[in-house]
Image: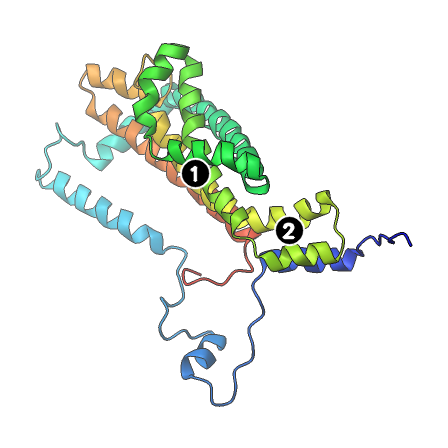
């Protein structure tokens, strides 16, 4: 008798996909359960960090700014070494007005966006191949683990030798910096998918595409977003380095040119621009992570 193949109903697919990304529902505590369990369910976690304030991250930068302003006002900080905050703001306004800062920022932003886009795609594809195939794991995982131990800065001389000192070299270094965290975190998430979900997918006779869509991709999503957050930061760090090599535009070029003329205020504006763009990029990824993984309850939440 031929075996009858039954396609999984949409409700089953939804249950399988939800099971792959959501933890098991908590069991109601007994009347005599510990106080910690009962207080946590009421929203008062006695041993946790408490309710987070969205503006709490401003405390550290505010204290640093106060110290900087106070030191500059009392001449404790030499303006030749570190310009005052008001001097830096005035310089930034002037750079924006004459178009130097926006033009160089646009060049640097394009480099980062292109490097992050290419590196993310390469990292995800390699993670899927290595995570879902034994042969792919033998080939790519060993190479990526080896790459993990090699700093990106160590291969810059080889990239200069291979690609020259133009845009190809700069974006290649950024791609290389992005691939590693995306691959590692996505691959670890794939390897960490519970086998019970795989068995459930086999029981419901999911096709390969359905298995990939409802089990693999949702299960790897938390790891991918974590790796993507690291990748964005590493991309800006790599940009700071590569823009020191024969750059004719970009924030790094503006900093190098200001260094020649001892314009510490312009140099500081460039450094602050790097910091703001890096922190802003990470904040956008955190917002995306919060929306896609809003069901998770963690200590930081």
What residue lies at 41% left-to-right and 36% top-to-bottom? Answer: 145
Q: Report the side of 285 relative to 61 (left or right).
A: right
Residue 64 position, x and y percent, is: 22, 46
Q: Which of the 4 image quarters holds residue 157?
A: top left
Closest to the observer, 9 or 102: 9
What residue lies at 8% left-to-right and 37% top-to-bottom? Answer: 75
Total marks in image:
2
Distance in Å between CA atoms under marks 1 and 2: 22 Å
- Split into 4 quadrants, where in the image is the N terminus? bottom right
Q: Report the side of 249 relative to 210 (left or right).
A: left
Q: Which of the 4 image quarters holds residue 196?
A: bottom right
- Tell me if residue 251 comes above or below residue 58 in the rendering: above
Image disc number at residue 215 = 2
What residue lies at 32% left-to-right and 12% top-to-bottom? Answer: 246
- Tell me if residue 49 comes above or below residue 35 in the rendering: above
Closest to the observer, 80 or 112: 112
What residue does disc 1 label?
181
Classify 10 Å Cα crowding around label 1: few (below 14), some (14-19), many (20 and above): many
In the orientation shown, which residue stands out farthest toward the right? 1
- Tell me if residue 297 comes above or below residue 152 in the rendering: below
Residue 297 position, x and y percent, is: 49, 63
Closest to the observer, 151 or 178: 151
Dots 1 and 2: beta carbons under 8 Å? Answer: no
Residue 277 seen in the current view? no
Q: Report the side of 199 relative to 272 (left or right).
A: right
Q: Report the side of 196 relative to 113 (left or right).
A: right
């Amino acid at each position: 008798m031929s075996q009858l193949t039954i396609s999984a109903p949409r409700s089953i697919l939804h249950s399988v996909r939800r099971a792959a990304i959501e933890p098991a529902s908590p069991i109601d505590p007994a009347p005599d359960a510990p106080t910690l369990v009962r207080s946590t369910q009421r929203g008062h976690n006695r041993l946790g960090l408490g309710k987070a304030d969205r503006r709490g991250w401003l405390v550290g930068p505010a204290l640093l700014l106060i110290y900087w302003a106070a030191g500059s006002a009392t001449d404790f900080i030499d303006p030749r070494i570190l310009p005052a905050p008001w001097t830096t703001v005035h310089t930034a306004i002037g750079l924006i007005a004459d178009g130097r800062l926006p033009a160089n920022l646009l060049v640097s932003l394009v480099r980062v966006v292109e490097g992050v886009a290419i590196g993310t795609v390469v990292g995800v594809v390699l993670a899927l191949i290595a995570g879902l195939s034994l042969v792919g794991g033998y080939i790519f995982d060993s190479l990526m683990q080896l790459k993990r131990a090699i700093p990106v800065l160590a291969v810059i001389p080889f990239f200069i030798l291979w690609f020259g000192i133009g845009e190809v070299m700069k974006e290649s270094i950024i791609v290389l910096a992005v691939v590693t965290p995306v691959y590692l975190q996505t691959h670890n998430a794939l390897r960490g998918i519970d086998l019970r979900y795989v068995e459930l997918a086999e029981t419901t006779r999911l096709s390969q595409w359905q298995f990939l869509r409802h089990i693999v991709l949702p299960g790897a999503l938390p790891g991918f977003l974590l790796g993507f957050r690291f990748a964005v930061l590493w991309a800006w760090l790599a940009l700071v380095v590569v823009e020191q090599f024969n750059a004719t535009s970009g924030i790094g070029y503006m900093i190098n040119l200001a260094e020649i003329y001892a314009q510490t205020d312009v140099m500081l504006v460039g450094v602050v621009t790097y910091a703001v763009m890096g922190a802003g990029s990470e904040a956008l990824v955190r917002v995306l992570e919060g929306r896609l993984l809003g069901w998770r309850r963690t200590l930081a939440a």
